[in-house]
Amino acid sequence: MDLYRIHNTLVGKTAQVISGFMELRGVGIIDIKRLYGITSVANSAEISFEIRLETYNPSVAYDRVGLGDKQYSNYLGIPVLKMVIPVTYGRPMATVIETAVTNYLLQQDGFDSAEVFEELVLEEIEKNRSEEEEEVKAAAMQNAEPLN
């Protein structure tokens, strides 16, 4: 893929000679257009999100919720949001990548699952704290001696 900066947008374009083909290790070169249809291939696309797959390392503290600091790569002077996904055997990578992209698109549309989750957890903590305070007050009232 060749990268171009068009105004403040990063665009990736496929070289015509390899357009529609992909190497699939163990299988060889496959023709995406013929296998999955013409709509499965884009000759160019805006690049706004990068997924980096790396071998899982148990000593690395990966962001598990999605509230950590965002990472960016810089291409031709344009910052691109980067998500690092740890890879292990047996994970359905196509599903993981598709889910990451869909979640990114939802974030671009103003919906952040991690923020919603955090709000729900904080509300539950506050609710439990209030219930515990009420129980402590009730127990104190029961143990209090009547004033005469």
Image (tube, rainbow, N blue to C red):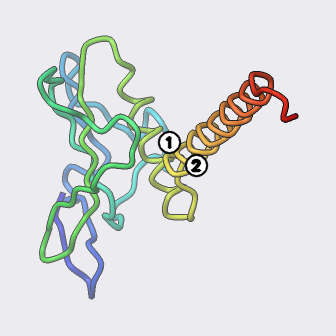
Q: Nearer the viewer, residue 131 or 70?
A: 131
The x and y percentages for residue 76 are 12, 74
- Front residue of this view, candidates 52 and 133: 133
**Mark drawn on residue 37:** 1
- Whole-angstrom CA distance, mark 1 to mark 2, is 42 Å
Q: Position of residue 45 (x, y in %)?
A: 35, 64
- For label 1, the crowd category at 10 Å Cα-Cα, with few meaning under 14, some 14 to 19 and many 20 or more, is few
Residue at the image point whose x is 30% and y is 39% from the top:
63
Would you place residue 72 above or below residue 86 in this image? below
Callout 2: SS: helix
Look at 16% across and 61% down and name the residue there. 73
Rendered-image quadrant of the N terminus: bottom left
The residue that label 2 is drawn on is 119
Three-letter amino acid code at the position of disc 1? Gly
Residue 109: assigned label: none
Left-right relation of 15 to 141 = left
Whether residue 135 sits left or right of residue 25 in the image: it is: right
Amino acid carrying mark 2 in the image? Glu
Please tell me which residue lies in front, 93 or 81.
81
